[in-house]
Image (cartoon, grey):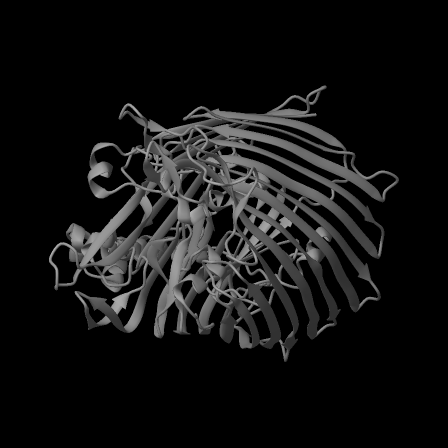
Amino acid sequence: MKLLPSIFTLETIQNRCGSKRAFQSSSATCGWATIRMFCAVFFMVVLRIEAQQPADSLEGKKVVLDEVFVSAIRVTNEVPVTYSNLKKEEFASRNLGQDIPILMNFLPSVVTTSNAGAGIGYTGIRVRGSDATRVNVTINGIPYNDSESQGTFWVNMPDFASSTESLQLQRGVGTSTNGAGAFGASLNILTDAVSEEAYAQISSSVGSFNTLRNNLKFSTGLLNDHVEISGRLSRITSDGYVDRASSELDAYFLEGAYKDDNTLIKALLFGGHEITYQSWFGIDAATLATDRTFNPAGQYTDENGTTRFYDKEEDNYKQDHAQLLWNEKISDKWSTNIALHYTHGRGYFEQFREDDDFATYGFTPLNVDGEEVNTTDLIRRRWLDNDFYGTVFSANYRDENLNLILGGGWNQYEGAHFGEVIWARFAGNSNIRDRYYDDDSKKTDLNVYTKANYQVNDQWSLFGDVQYRTIGYQANGEDTGLVDDTFNFFNPKAGVTYDLNNNNNLYLSYAIANREPNRNDFENGNPKPERLQDVELGWRYVSPNLQVNTNAYYMRYKDQLVLTGELNDVGAPLRENIGDSYRLGLEIDANIKFNDRFQWRPNVALSSNKNIDFVFQRDGTLQQLGNTNIAFSPNLVVGNWFTYSPIETLQISFLSKYVGKQYMGNIDSEGSVLEAYSQLDFNVQYVWNIDAFIDSITFSGMINNVANEDIVSDGYFFTFDDDFSNPGTITTVEGAGFYPQAGRNFLLGATLRF
């Protein structure tokens, strides 16, 4: 490796990125010190490597055959969209049972959390401060977000990473896709590629909190050069870091594929069954300081005054997916994709209720020993039974200068929501299997889009993308009221890419996105749809040993449904329209290959996320708070990923994450603060090639939170008006709950491949 010229010393670069004093700043300014240090080291490394790089092309490599199913919604470097790719081989060494969001934790602008504290069970993801309801997720191009809540529940697909070939995370509005609009990011997942050779493998992993993961995978390879059958069975159990936050997860994946020179057809069946003890109640600050793992879920007092915990305070839910995918190459320039899909979900949340009102359940008051009884202890189940089905389709025309895609989709959701009391100390005039509420919902979603990338000349290319989307939603729940709304959205996008040379290009894009409210939004009244204008300006550098992505963005919202910090009675986050708001940020990520043994993948995201002229009712009067921070939107997120391979079969990785201070509400209250935190993980993988009956054994190990930091990555915040303590005076009272994450913990695994 060549040395830098004397002009490119660390001192010189420090002066360019910020004074030396920044590196000696106090904890109050450690965020700026971090980013300046990152800037100094990053650009010094870039300059050293760039000086020795041969020319290489920005054009992407030829995609594997299976990628035709996501080609309509994925992008390449020639499209003015900000994105990151993550391939199977890049997360395989860490795939020891944790959910997909946890495996994505080190991508730019990504923040993840786990209710149980250890990455198994209910997990969540935020991108650029936008929560999971704003992240559009597709699997093989088919929508995965729940139609009503718009959330993604990875717990319903345990161990799905083991059947994932690759994923692409587009930040911002991104390109037109199927399903709900992307308001912070879109994530599209491609399942396992067709394997030409037969194999079988058994994987097992164990870890902290009695975590155990076992799976079995197989493939027949290509039979008669055309047909492959493959599958997976998985089981994961864990006690969780938080008390009783246990998970019992089962999953399956079965795929049949047919291919020839012009046709690829896949039929997939996959799904899961989860039984998860609830851990979304969180704990207050005092409990956090004295008993981090305490879980109040299921707590009650028995007849003797003893505090007990109901042992079945849990979710019990099954979800099954069927997909039929068909790609046809019609000519050298035309190809088509069509997919049919069906998802069936059913299950309940079981809960012990202490001294609950008869009126809630339609019970008639009783006379017991001469006294009227109108409350009772009981156990209830709140059911969801739903079906989601439809089709997505696209046609692709490609020649030397033009890549044109015409596509769309029609999807329908039908959901039944009902509640049952399965036991009560006093039950009035109720009958077995009576439903104390019973309502239905229906949502129809139709979208069509056209997008094109046109190569004007060797340097300039133009991108255009227009989508029309119409949504009809009906619901009749007590929480939502009677809803019968139709939304019609027009979502245009345009951009330009300029290739400076074979290694560098610049891009600029402007996009408009509109999005409908979700079911929970109707609990707060009559919500408005949201509107987003997104401007992205970026520079990319690509060479064999160095890739750099730098982009600035400005996301301006109208009537954004921001998280209030509050939760409803089943732990779902509540949102409200807040008028005008914006997110302004800078993201830098790189992949630096020093040599065949050492690789560094750093990223940094710096942002400002504001509600404009925010108004809040405090102590009975409306107050102008000016510009406030948007809830759950840290201003600084830094990731690092160092990988060292001393020999070909051994890989050692250090992964780190820094997430800056966040507010859990929108009023900048100190009581709503999630303090900044950092996390260091250690990962090792060794492959023992046997080439006998057993082809190879792969050993993997993971130590999470090596430094044993006290991390709190999520929580909730609420306010209410108190006029009882001091009659005639309204006082606004604040409260908060926190979700602590596990300290130092480990996972160890082995995979036998036959």
Position in image of residue 584 (x %, y %) = 35, 69
Q: Is residue 628 above or below residue 455?
A: above
Image mark count: 0
Q: Quadrant of residue 499?
A: bottom right
Residue displayed at 28% across by 41% down: 283
Q: Is residue 437 above or below residue 224?
A: below
**Left or right for 710, reference 251:** left
Position in image of residue 325 (x %, y %) = 75, 54
Q: Is residue 419 above or below residue 84?
A: above
Position in image of residue 681 (x %, y %) = 38, 37
Q: Quadrant of residue 622?
A: bottom left
Name the quadrant of the C terminus. Answer: top right
Judging depth in this view, the residue of 412 and 667 nearest the camera is 412
Judging depth in this view, the residue of 141 and 401 nearest the camera is 141
Farthest residue, direction top? 693
Is residue 78 in sight in this rendering? no
Position in image of residue 165 (x %, y %) = 63, 45
Judging depth in this view, the residue of 558 and 752 nearest the camera is 558
Farthest residue, direction bottom? 456
Is residue 136 in sight in this rendering? yes
**Left or right for 217, reference 258:** left
Residue displayed at 27% across by 62% down: 17
**Left or right for 25, reference 460:** left
Residue displayed at 24% across by 38% down: 288
Q: Quadrant of residue 74?
A: bottom right
